[in-house]
């Protein structure tokens, strides 16, 4: 796994080999968002953000990237959309729709997702004291053949039955493991979901609210990026840089270039 | 500018490219007009604007206080500030009229052939056809729900159908020639908020519903023949040639087979998956009871947006469709292949309680989208934001651009603002000095910027 937490002091490590690497052991100032805000290519941005995924103490979760973070990191959004589409078709990435907002999507590399799934399946099996073969069928037949974020009931059953006979309890097992969620609008369709990230999602929503209220309370609703980065959010276990990229990409915050550096301002609507 | 005219004269520049260059220059330099103003006497928020298609002279607006107004945008009614600002006063129809609508008017469109008739639809479940010269209602259709949008085809030579999008799941076609309903198109699973006729065929209708689906209907057949799915995408303006051949095969089988395999939810580009899915649909068709082949698409649950579809606009060449949804996305669809072209327009938030009207320039270069209190102009092909037109005090829901590169926007602040390219020369100042120079009205303080 690439995100290894070797140095106990720094919370995020830069993947760039270079003069910034030795500094990162002392403090995390070198990974200032100001220097690393915009990348040239979607794949580079994805790998960088995956490496910088914050380490959470209680929960072990594989790194995932929010689509809004990607939009704030690469200049051309159309290029991002198209490259994501081709990566998704090549099955390098998976896209998941999250329930934290109107248009929130999470991107996860295939290896990370399979690791996360294995962990969830293992914990499920220890609880149930039995090996359920439906998880294998799910991984082999469904995940590898369907790159979309959602799937219909009939299609799910037919793909699973390539492995063996499918019962309704098997689908409930998949939902209980957190691998599938029913869609609210349409009871016949399911969303693919990342298991065991409930606390992280809660952290995302609360962190967003806290960061926005922090800026809105200021007189001019803005703050220097260098100062903002050093703050710690009370309600979210995730690093503030995670939330900053996310809110910049979704348009709630914007950056302004000033002679003394970047300033983040809350956009009023 | 003069150099280009010289080039055109000498033949170095082709006339068509000269015209398109002038037009795109004008369209990209829009600002709040400093020589034209519309005096709006509506008492409610403005829901719909349209300039007539025949002369481009009259602007029709419908408001929430059930009032309608027609403005002559080429001839001003009077001038002020020493002849620099032209004011246009309306010909008004308001609530006191005996046959007027009772509740808000949500849509007002001109009869596409001439300005003698116009059609209005309102939240009081009625669609009325008015005679412009006598300002009387000549026809009245009662709908089962609130009318969100009406549309008439500008290409139609053999029919005079008004397509009505209401909060009922069925789209009704009202025939103006006979005064009766022609037929209904069913397939949506929630109210329909947006309806547009195609710019390339008089028989094709596109509707967008509150369930997030965009459906294409050929009114001569039952059922819709295409449902746009946001997960079917193509990378670029044209689908790659190889994929086009595989998807075309599906299309032609659609027409008259008992087992019509409809457009499926699935990755549209890899051909191996399409084979798999077709088998699935066949199996499903035999397991259920026999449905009319046209109605098989009612089981197709593909969505174009994650929320409701608020507005649709087809480009003038009829090849691309822009759709705005309440998930705050604006998407560009290639009509021929039915795929999402994945152009990303940076929209933060859209007003999601009303249907919104989009506008596209004539050469399909810029799309204008009303976002809350401003209008954002995006480049259609790259998705970059070109300008933000800020001028209204409250939310805007409709905008219309005519062929003169002028943009009209109407909002909840009851004003209609004109945005036009800056005027090049103050040519008529001397002539109009003799006109009555009334003391500037307090209205001048309405300008911002």
Image (cartoon, grey):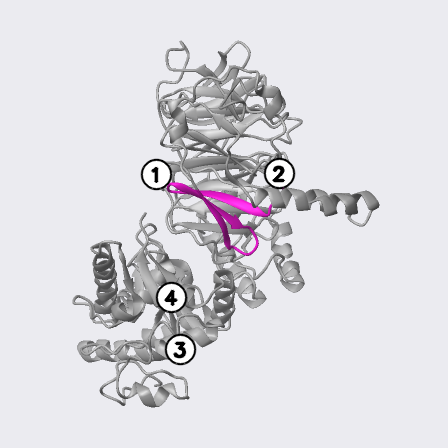
| Image mark for residue B199 | 2
Q: Looking at the image, how many numbered discs can be counted on the residues? A: 4
Observer-nearest residue: B319 or A264? A264
**Residue under numbered circle 3:** A48
| Image location (x, y in percent) of residue B198 | 59, 38
**Residue under numbered circle 4:** A259
Q: Work out whether residue A167 can be spotted.
A: no
Observer-nearest residue: A160 or B13? B13
* Placement of the N terminus of chain B among the 4 image quadrants: top right
Quadrant of residue A64 within the rendered picture: bottom left
* Furthest residue in direction right, as rendered: B10
What segment is highlighted magenta in the picture? B362-389
Callout 3 and callout 4 share a chain:
yes
Callout 3 and callout 1 share a chain:
no
| Image location (x, y in percent) of residue B179 | 53, 17
**Residue under numbered circle 1:** B353
Which element type, helix, strand or loop, lies under badge 3?
Answer: helix
| Image location (x, y in percent) of residue A145 | 46, 70
Q: Is B373 contained in the magenta span?
A: yes
* Furthest residue in direction left, as rendered: A234
Q: Work out whether residue A83 can be spotted.
A: yes
Between the residue at mark 4 and the residue at mark 1, the CA separation in whole angstroms equals 42 Å
């Amino acid at each position: 796994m690439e995100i290894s937490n070797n140095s106990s002091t720094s919370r995020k490590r830069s993947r760039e080999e270079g003069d910034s690497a030795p500094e990162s052991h002392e403090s995390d100032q070198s990974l200032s968002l100001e220097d690393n805000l915009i990348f040239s290519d979607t794949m580079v941005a994805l790998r960088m953000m995956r490496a910088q995924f914050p380490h959470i103490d209680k929960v072990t979760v594989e790194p995932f990237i929010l689509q809004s973070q990607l939009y704030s990191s690469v200049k051309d959004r159309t290029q991002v959309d198209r490259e994501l589409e081709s990566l998704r078709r090549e099955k390098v990435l998976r896209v998941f729709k999250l329930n934290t907002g109107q248009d929130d999507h999470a991107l996860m590399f295939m290896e990370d997702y399979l690791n996360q799934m294995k962990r969830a399946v293992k914990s499920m099996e220890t609880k149930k004291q039995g090996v359920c073969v439906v998880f294998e069928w799910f991984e082999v037949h469904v995940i590898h053949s369907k790159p979309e974020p959602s799937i219909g009931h009939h299609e799910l059953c037919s793909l699973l039955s390539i492995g063996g006979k499918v019962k309704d309890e098997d689908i409930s097992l998949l939902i209980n493991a957190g691998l599938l969620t029913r869609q609210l609008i349409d009871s016949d369709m399911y969303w693919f979901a990342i298991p065991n990230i409930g606390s992280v999602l809660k952290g995302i929503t609360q962190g967003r609210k806290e960061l926005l209220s922090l800026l809105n309370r200021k007189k001019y609703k803005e703050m220097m990026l260098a100062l903002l980065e050093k703050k710690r959010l009370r309600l979210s276990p995730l690093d503030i840089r995670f939330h900053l990229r996310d809110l910049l990409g979704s348009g709630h915050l914007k950056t302004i270039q000033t002679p003394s550096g970047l300033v983040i301002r809350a956009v009023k609507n | 500018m003069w150099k280009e005219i010289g080039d055109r004269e000498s033949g170095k520049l082709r006339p068509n490219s000269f015209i398109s260059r002038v037009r795109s220059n004008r369209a990209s330099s829009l600002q709040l007009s400093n020589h034209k103003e519309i005096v709006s006497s509506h008492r409610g928020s403005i829901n719909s604007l349209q300039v007539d298609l025949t002369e481009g002279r009259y602007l029709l607006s419908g408001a929430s206080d059930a009032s309608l107004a027609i403005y002559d945008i080429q001839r001003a009614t009077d001038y002020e500030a020493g002849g620099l600002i032209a004011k246009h006063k309306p010909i008004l129809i308001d609530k006191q009229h005996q046959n007027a609508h009772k509740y808000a008017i949500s849509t007002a469109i001109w009869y596409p052939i001439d300005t003698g008739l116009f059609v209005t639809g309102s939240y009081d479940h009625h669609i009325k056809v008015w005679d412009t010269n006598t300002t009387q209602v000549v026809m009245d259709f009662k709908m089962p729900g609130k009318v969100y949008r009406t549309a008439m085809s500008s290409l139609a030579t053999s029919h005079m159908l008004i397509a009505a999008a209401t909060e009922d799941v069925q789209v009704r076609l009202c025939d103006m020639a006979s005064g009766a309903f022609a037929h209904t198109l069913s397939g949506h699973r929630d109210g329909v908020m947006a309806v547009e006729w195609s710019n390339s065929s008089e028989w094709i209708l596109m509707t967008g519903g509150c369930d997030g689906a965009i459906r294409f209907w050929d009114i001569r057949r039952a059922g819709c023949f295409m449902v746009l799915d946001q997960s079917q995408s193509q990378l670029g303006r044209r689908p790659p040639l190889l994929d086009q051949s595989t998807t075309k095969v599906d299309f032609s089988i659609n027409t008259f087979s008992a087992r019509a395999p409809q457009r499926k939810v699935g990755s549209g580009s890899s051909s191996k998956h399409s084979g798999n899915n077709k088998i699935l649909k066949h199996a499903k068709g035999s397991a259920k009871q026999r449905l009319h082949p046209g109605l098989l698409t009612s089981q197709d649950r593909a969505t174009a947006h994650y929320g409701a579809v608020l507005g649709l606009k087809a480009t003038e060449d009829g090849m691309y469709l822009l759709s705005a949804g309440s998930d705050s996305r604006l998407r560009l669809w290639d009509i021929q292949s039915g795929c999402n072209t994945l152009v990303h327009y940076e929209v933060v938030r859209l007003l999601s309680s009303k249907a919104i009207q989009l506008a596209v320039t004539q050469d399909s270069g810029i799309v204008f989208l009303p976002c809350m209190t401003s209008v954002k102009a995006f480049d259609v092909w790259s998705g970059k934001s070109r300008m933000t037109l800020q001028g209204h005090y409250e939310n805007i829901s409709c905008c219309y651009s005519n062929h003169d590169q002028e943009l009209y926007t109407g909002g909840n602040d009851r004003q209609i603002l004109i945005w036009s390219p800056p005027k090049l020369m103050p040519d008529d100042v001397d002539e109009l000095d003799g006109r009555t120079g009334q003391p500037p009205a307090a209205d001048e303080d309405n300008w911002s910027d």
